[in-house]
Amino acid sequence: GFVDRSIRRSIVHTVIWVALALLIVVVSARGITTPIASVVSSPKRITTADLSHEVAVRRSNELVDILKASAEMQTALRQSIEGHELAQQTLHDIGESFRVVIDNALDAVVAMNASGLITIWNKQAATVFGWAAEEAIGRKLHEMIVPERYREAHMRGVAGFLSGGRGALVDRRVEIQAIRRNGEEFPVELAITAATDSQGTRFTAFLRDITERKEAEERLHLAASVFTHAREGITITD
């Protein structure tokens, strides 16, 4: 599944037929005429991805040494392929676990590459911003969720970080305005991390819609203001 079968067959085919070439040289030089059907059939099976076949070793002469080396080589190749498949399966399992955690996070999780293209868009992002993942992934992030008046600053910040600077919003938690699909602006709590690997730099944003919290804070502020003004109008007499 994870090892490209055509590449695997090509590698095994090449190695085995090199061994056969050496065998032919030895056989020709020493005038050995013993049938080598077992040797020929083995690489044919290997090139069709049949790695369960073992080379039969029966004779106690130079041919035996070559057959033995071929058998050892076949075993080593099979073990190498099996080890690689196990490593690939482990990486796949880790990636799948990561995807499940991100997709079920309570916050909107949005990632973009160095070109500003969205690469991750979880379920909560779809709920908060109104764009399905298949609509958002591959598009410019600033065109999707950044209010127009902030877009230029956003692009300058990304460019500055990539050129060796420090982004104003990276590794910080801030409150800022975002925009939904319908054009509505709303407040979000934002945290951004940046990571660089073999595929380049990737920015991951964790966003939480704080509209209800802001409305509650505004109501409390209004109530406190009303109470303060009401108290100023109260006259206490003996």
Image (cartoon, rainbow, N blue to C red):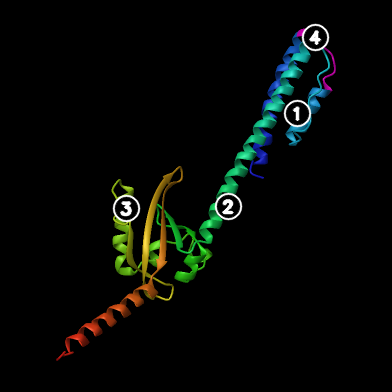
Q: CA distance from mark 4 to mark 1?
A: 23 Å
User: Residue lying furthest front in this view?
Assistant: 238
Mark 1 closeness class: few <14, some 14–19, many ≥20 residues within 10 Å? many
Three-letter residue code for mark 3:
Ala
Give the image location of residue 173, x and y in percent.
Answer: 34, 59
Res. 159 mark: 3
**Mark with earlier residue (4, 1):** 4
Three-letter residue code for mark 2:
Glu
**Mark with earlier residue (2, 1):** 1
- Residue 160 appears left or right of 57: left
Mark 4 closeness class: few <14, some 14–19, many ≥20 residues within 10 Å? few
The quadrant of the rendering that contains the N terminus is top right
Three-letter residue code for mark 1:
Pro
> Image point 75% across, 18% down: which residue?
68
- Residue 13 appears left or right of 212: right
The residue tagged with tag 4: helix, strand or loop? loop
Q: CA distance from mark 2 to mark 1?
A: 37 Å
**Mark with earlier residue (1, 3):** 1
Res. 31 mark: 4
